[in-house]
Amino acid sequence: MAYKNYILVCGGTGCESSKSEDIYRDLIKEAELQGVKNEVQVVKTGCFGFCERGPIVKVLPSESFYVGVTPQDAKEIIAEQVVKGREVKRLLYKKDQNATNTVRVQDIDFYQKQFRVVLRNCGVINPENIEEYIARDGYKALEKALFEMTPEQIIAEVKASGLRGRGGAGFPTGVKWESARGAPGDVKYIVCNADEGDPGAYMDRSTIEGDPHSILEAMIIAGKAVGAHQGYIYIRAEYPLAIERLNVAIAQAREMGLMGKDILGSGFDFDVELRLGAGAFVCGEETALLRSIEGNRGMPTPKPPFPAFKGLWDKPTVINNVETLANVPVVLTRGAQWFSSIGTEKSKGTKVFALTGKINNSGLIEVPMGTTLREIIFDIGGGIKGGKKFKGVQTGGPSGGIIVEKDLDTPISYESLVALGSMMGSGGMIVMDEDDCMVDVSKFYMGFCVDESCGKCAPCRIGTSQMYSILDKISKGNGVESDLDDLERIGKAMTKASLCALGGSAANPTMATIKHFREEYLEHIRNHKCRAGKCKDLVVYEINPEKCIGCGLCARKCPVPCIAGEKKQPHVIDKARCIKCGECFKACKFGAVIKR
Amino acid sequence: MINCKINGIPVQVAEGTSVLEAAKKANVKIPTLCYNPDLAPWAACGICVVKVEGSNKMLRSCTTPVTEGMSVITNDTDLVQTRKTVIELILSTHPNDCLNCPRNQDCELQTLAQEFGIRQQSFPKRLRNLPIDDTNGAIILNPEKCVRCGRCVTVCQQMQNVWAIEYLGRGESTRIAPAADVKLGDSPCIRCGQCSAHCPVGAIYENDQTGIVWEALQKTGPEAKTCVVQIAPAVRVALGESFGCAPGTDLTKKIYTALRRLGFDVVFDTNFSADLTIMEEATEFVKRLTEAMKMGMTDATSLKTLPLITSCCPSWVDYMEKYFPDMIPNFSTAKSPQQMMGTMIKTYWAAKAGIDPASIFSVSVMPCTAKKYESHRDDTMYASGFQDVDISITTRELARMIKQAGIDLLNLPESEADSPLGPYTGAGAIFGATGGVMEAALRTAYHFVTGDELKDVNFTGVRGISGIKEASVRVGQTEIRVAVAHQMSNIEQVLKEVQKARSEGRETPWHFIEVMACRGGCIGGGGQPYGATDEVRKMRIRAIYDHDEAAVYRCSHQNPFIQQVYKEFLEKPGSHKAHELLHTHYTERPLFLK
Amino acid sequence: MAKMTLDELRALREAKRKDLEKRDVEGKDIQIIVGMGTCGIAAGAKQTFDAIVDQVQKKGLEGQVLIRQTGCMGLCYVEPTVEVLVPGMPPVIYGKMTADTAEELVEKHLVGHQLLDNHILDRPAADILKN
């Protein structure tokens, strides 16, 4: 037997401190008092995220959204809503304090901050069931492409939508398709780049795991537009579940005649094969990826010639990112006009970001272009974990830069992020707080590039190693001021003279952190100090004798061991042998271990 | 045609020309390292960067084609600073070993460092401590000096189609070695030396054996040997380049003098034994052709009587034994001119001169690195009872010896080679160029078949730098079809056509095939002075054919000393004695010994 | 299923769409949907799925309850996530639903028609197909 009403009381930390616990108890009390306890269940929930207007109370099934609720309101809520079935108008959310009309929950700005176009089916359908995909307008775009539109019309629609490559470069997709269509040759290819290698980025993985058919449909449409009959999906081997789901999807599509020969009786043939990567980040670079499919070493080759003219096996090839492709069916079913109404003037549509790092609500989000970073981090993301201070957000993976507090109100677009010294990249967004050391962050990304550099061109192969060794030196307290000049000189040469974007952008995190956090670098160099406490060699652990009660717990936890002391006597850390693991700091219950 | 500007200078070039090439027309030489005109641009080093006016982006000029109206800037502060930094980065992974390096003063990285005024080590050295690989006897790999320009890999894989070396590892630990990291001696390497000829630094070089030669030359007393030297057709038109001459400067007679001044007791000429090779090989060809005409061409093809394929190139022999062992019966059993000379010196000449062959030290100077291996390839290279050719050194090694000895090569008086193994015909001289062996063989084959002499001995159809050349020649009643291939990657196509004809029961497309492993023929050999481009090769080839035209006799069989050798010693071409001394056999070999 | 023609595809789409709206599949009107992206699986969603199946069986509800999988909803910080659709009750998305919560889920929500405390979340965005 279901309840007639459910009252959800937001139990997030924001609301809790404003007495949501009291509201919860008072609502239950009032329900009892007013004799309706069998008609309503009062439930505590997780954070709704609308913290600035808390405490929040939501009533279902009417979807009434009350803000700024106090425990005193409990009586009225029960009396009006539960007993009489009327909303308490004064508590309902209004756009501002003076507005008279209230707004439905769905219309609340906050809840429109995410707009799931690419992820439209993720979390809604069973990805291993093609019929569910079909039911939600799946393969409807393909119908249009095969029976109602000419290849030129398809390309015109994609061009008009303003869709740009989501892999990071932001090249207009329609223009790329048009070039490939115009390139001479009978044999052409469509390649999907699913070799998502940026650390912390998993947008493409989730899209494929949750909605593999969207990619397949898009590839067939691309094939029709360009004149290709064979597609390859290059997917990294580290994504076994995505590979499995793709294989299931391909088999189902083939079985139903949605892929293969004479699709839906249209006379058009198209088939897709998978190609697995083998652990090379550089194979996400389009030319290296194509060389890898050909069976060669995954090393970039110069452009021009561009893949649209001479790509896979020297044939015209369209190579698109997973997210770009996932947008294509929607562009065709909803139309270019609808699509281009989302976003900014030059960056149309939405972008999926993997919001990770020191943030409360980490996860995959999809927002229209033009959303600000502040909205993403503090509204959708729920702010910094543990209430710490925001330091910076890293966008674009190892190719990107750091964006600091003063620039957080920038609306996101390809151009705006580049102007800030970063880039959109594939969508990784890593939030950092006061406990993150910028030298360490830059060192981490440079180390990644050192590992992943293919080794073909000198600027990247040697530049990354030299820069890494300088950053390492600085993080260990052995840096000198001229090191910063060297970093800038090598970084500049690497950016300009590398053969591909791996080397061409490897210096970005370093250059951005030096620009915004130069004092932090200088602190490492001049004062041998790491203010975030991350650079182990610069951190000193010691015991405050005034607070230490001699319980010996730290000594027992110490792996070296290097803590000495008698029972009930203040203990001492042997700094010369200390390996800075921090176990004593974590263990001490009396705050006697100090980390400097 | 495309109109563009280089540093403001208007230039007109064909469509598809790279910015690098277009710049040459404006007399601008953009600095490069990994670029080489023989190979498709690899675009690795990042030194050839330029800018297009209006953009701050840097492009690689080696691989960017010019477009209409493009205005290129090749030199501004930004570009120079970037190039300098890249060079310094490369230097930071390169040992400071110039004084001890085989490329001292002839090294492209050294030149760049000098041109960019590098005066200090800006970045800490990052060396890798990798061992030298000298297991192959002819070519040595020193990975410590490798700048990873990629030329050798492209050469071995695309230009030569041997695939002995490949990239291993990635990032900073990228290095170049045979696949599966086996030693070069266990790899498919055919020792053509093209890798060493293209390497810009001292990472790949020939096994320098001049020390052994010096030792022999300078020995005195009862242990002293009679030092005999032979010099190959291709050496004389290229040696001058090491002394500042233009390519194709013919220094034959000065070289004879130089060799004597170095201490050689006797100076012979490989061109003579080239004539000898023609006697044997043309005889072999005529014999096979006659047999083929008797049994019918289709049968002759399937029984491998035809085509006959030349065998004087030891890299080609090695390639065939490894990659196409089914063609072994098609190979001419005649040894190469170097080896024939070696045998003749220690038998015919030793007897004539009254010298104990055991005391002869026989040296050959070759444009070739593979000849170092050929001299001890199998037991037939000991036909005289001793190692027929004791040591083979390259043109580069000879140049060093001459300089070391303080011999002023260019100003020496001229002299002649010694008889009877010195004088040669034009046919012997043209062995150095691609098509030369074929042309020489046809000149003599014509005489063997018809008994007449050719009115015009020039077979221009087999000459030139084109990778595969085909021609047909009327000899008596028969139309003989020939093919000439040079640069190893071109041969696969030719052989596959023969195999196809064989398997389909058809007649072979060609009766006689010449193969040279090096582009341009021996004049483009792996042991020649550095810097060979097609332009250089053409100049060297021109000199070879000029040498032929100036010769007294143009056909091998007309050489009186050749006639004397047969009369006095070998009886006739293809005799039992000739076979014992001047012929060899072949065996299938594995690609990888491990 | 055999290769379809254009008309067959359209008919299938209509039929399945009605199905999804009805939320009545094979006569089962209660649906439990477990997020099975790699993030969910890493957090234990497979165990959660199995535990729910187990509990549903224990309570004898297999005939009424359909348990399905789906992809990532984007609520990665509270995986495993489970969506519960019971007729007459508002649709709810729960987070942090490790295997040990399965019993409470079935008992309290499916049987008792009561929502679970401290687990409720919101769907992050509106469904663009419902516009």
Image: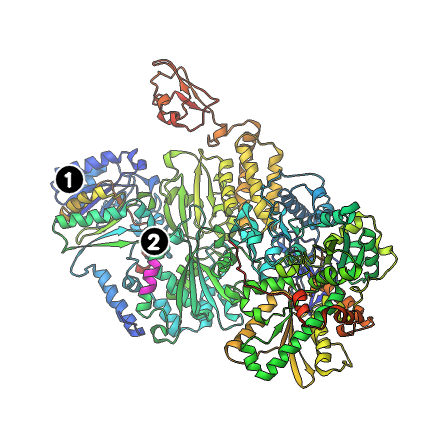
Look at the numbered discs 1 and 2 and tell me whether their residues touch, using CB distance below 8 Å.
no
Residue A264 visible in the snapshot: yes
Q: Which of the chains bears the disc numbered 2?
A: A
Q: Tally the numbered discs.
A: 2
Disc 2: which residue: A241
Q: Quadrant of residue A489?
A: top right
Res. A338 visible in picture:
no
Distance of mark 1 from mark 2, alpha carbons?
Answer: 48 Å
Q: Which residue is mark 1?
A: A31
Residue shown at 73%/61% (left/top)? B347
User: Magenta residues, as a range?
Assistant: A245-251
Q: Nearer the viewer, residue A521 or B127?
A: B127
Prevailing SS of the magenta stretch: helix
In the rendered image, the quadrant that contains the N terminus of chain B is bottom right
Q: Secondary structure at mark 1?
A: helix
On screen, residue B530 above or below B113: below
Residue positioned most to the bottom: B477
Q: Nearer the viewer, residue A329 or A589?
A: A589
Please provide percent x and percent y for residue B147. Answer: 62, 48
Q: Amino acid at mark 2?
A: Leu
The quarter of the picture where residue B466 lies is bottom right
Q: Is residue B164 left or right of residue A131?
A: right
Within-10-Å neighbours for mark 2: few <14, some 14–19, many 20+ = some
Name the kind of residue labelled 1 in the image.
Ala
Q: Name the one closer to the observer, B207 or B274.
A: B274
**Do marks 1 and 2 both belong to one polypeptide chain?**
yes
Q: Nearer the viewer, mark 1 or mark 2?
A: 2
